[in-house]
Image (cartoon, helix red, strand yellow):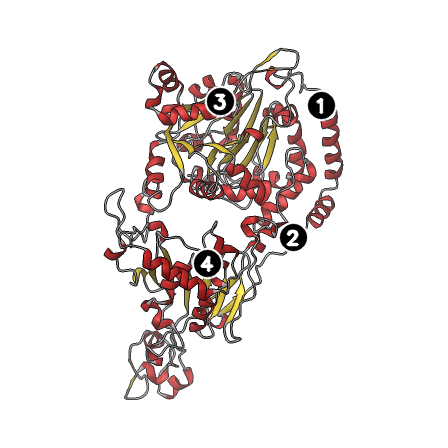
Amino acid sequence: MKSFVPNAAMVHTHSVLSTHGSNEVASADSMKFDHLYVPIVDEVVKICAIPLRPRCSKVCDPMKEGSSKLNAPLVDDYHFAEDLQAQMKNSTAEDALDPGDISVVYICEFPEIKGKLDRDKAAELGLESGPKYGELKRGNPVKSDHLDRTIHPCDVMEPSFPGPIVLLVDCPTLSHLQELSSLQSLTLYYSNTSEQPVEMCKKVNCLIHLSPASVTNTTAYEQWMTRFGEAQHIMAGHEPKNIEIPILKSSSRIAAKLNYLCPQFFPAPGFLTLKQLKSLPSVSRFPRELSLPTSCRFIYAENLLKFNLLPYKDLGLDNSGVADTFSRTEIIDELTSEIPEIVSASEHIIQLWHGNNGTNGGTPLPSCLEGITREDMEIVLLGTGSSQPSKYRNVSSIFINLFSKGGILLDCGEGTLGQLKRRFGVEGADEAVKGLRCIWISHIHADHHAGLARILTLRRDLLNETPHEPLIVVGPQQLEIFLDRYQMLEDLDMQFLDSRDTTKSSWEAFELNEDNDANGSASRLKNTLRESGLISLNSVPVIHCPQAYGIVLKAADKTNVIGKMIPGWKIVYSGDTRPCPELVEASRGATVFIHEATFEDGMVEEAIAKNHSTMGEAVDAGDAAGAYRVILTHFSQRYPKIPVFDESYMNKACVAFDLMSVNLADLPMLPRVLPYLKLLFRDEIVVHESDDVNSAIAEV
């Protein structure tokens, strides 16, 4: 992450698994795997890390996806052990160990908890209340105020007792389980071991198991769990039931309200019921009840379940924050009660759609939209906030849905996969990821690419059994450095193309070059675009940070049923930028111009300082380019629900919301919906307009 995170922000970084050269990985024989590393130790907590490797890294693990062993009974540990031992006998010392094969067990230990000072005893020993109490609590002896004697802490302090201990266990396969069961570093933490004196054993209060059900449901794993006596076990590995309940309750409520008001631009979120989830291949195997002794306490994790550690009197499970099931009916009833006018507003929007005649305020329909169908293209705004996620807006990501021809991601901030699932559901998100043709990243700031590796690894897993080509990722050079380093841990199944090779001048040079195969990535991208019904993807340098770009996507022309040539649509996305003449020039005649609008109009100085744009500047850029529609996005998180905007801008523009989906066929309606959205957020707008602007600046 050092390729994009400042050194000043990198804390507690410690590499426990060094590599030798860029393409070589240290062999198992050269590492001490049963070793306790201590990357963090201070007066608050000590965190130890135990690297956990599989006993056989390159041989087939019968429990991995795609293996026939997956269909075997989970409790058949004896035969599994026989198979695994046979494989290990056949494996050689030359089997390399990939760093990505190694997981970690973390041990979090809190300091000893001092006993309370007995004030009655202190008084009996002639000690008055005051600073000397503090000295005793710190373990120092003091002189009595009224008696000729020294008072030691043990004279007045109740006995101390060990602080809480928590283990975080990630045991991804049964190959790792064999190693886990034999770790000598954990012996001190077992309650029923004969290898250590009882007084030397440390009591573990809680274990959080990230291990999947295919591992935790085995007898061998259950037996390992019993070694910790009465510790609380929280089974947190891949629990599908948690998908049923939206964890982001506030944004889910907003999504439900927007869907009620305007379902055309805000389709129903893709939350699935538990019944539907059981049929999904990825989560169809629900955990069975573990056959543990009653003294071994365990619970399946739920979103926002807590285990309190301190203060010690509150030690234990706390489910007070666990979310309730999502009730759309209750939310809509509450909405119509608070804003009765919203009912007629929803009806007016329906009438607008039925009365749409292809024009808006005298603006004629662009020729590229003649005969458009709902299966041509859809813009899905997955994240519309800046800098970092908030309750209502995730960070930057836009999904260009080409339907049967796949899709393209423009930026991929953290949480992008979660947003795809919230919009399309679990299965729909998987299909969208499998169908990706390209991912384009505007610049190196983390809020625009931190979700990239998760998308790439999911696509790799989904297409594991299907012949396919690596996904093309277009981005700045610094991004390639990060991705190359990440691929030392696990294969991302991608092919990188520098943004500089996708500018207009670079494409022109590419076309003039007779040996186009010299740049294989560019050639592949060209073919991929053609298969997706596009004729160009041009990156445009913009004014933000080094190697920051906007993008222009152009669809191929097509012929309608009567032989008339219909020009292809043109989509422009600004990335992060100040108003940029080069981008405006490249955007001439754009069908949709998606422009960042981080700040309200009264904050021009802040926008200049941060190399961002105000809403007015973004709208002016769209006007200068002659764009048919302008979508404003990337709002400062100081506007949690709706930004402050000038109504005069909205003749062709609209503000974006997370999960907003704009179909090409609905573009004429886009500006006409904004007044109704303003009604939905009328209270928030009043608050924004009365804010002291200067006291609320917290932008990156």
Numbered label attached to residue 580 = none
- Using the image, determine if residue 25 lies above or below residue 542: below
Amino acid type at mark 1: Asn
User: Would residue 142 be found to the left or right of residue 418 on screen?
Assistant: left
Task: State if disc 1 and disc 2 touch (CB < 8 Å).
Answer: no
Q: Which residue is mark 1?
A: 356
Q: Specify which label sits upstream in the sequence, 2 or 1.
A: 2
Residue 429 image position (x, y, % from top left): 55, 41
Q: Residue at image x 74%, y 26%?
A: 354
Amino acid type at mark 3: Arg
Between marks 1 and 4, how big is the CA–CA gap?
52 Å
Numbered label attached to residue 530 = 3
Q: Nearer the viewer, residue 463 or 645?
A: 463
- Using the image, determine if residue 296 lies above or below residue 82: below
Numbered label attached to residue 210 = 4
Amino acid type at mark 2: Lys
Q: Nearer the viewer, residue 672 or 14?
A: 14
Between marks 1 and 3, how big is the CA–CA gap?
33 Å
Q: Specify which label sits upstream in the sequence, 3 or 4.
A: 4
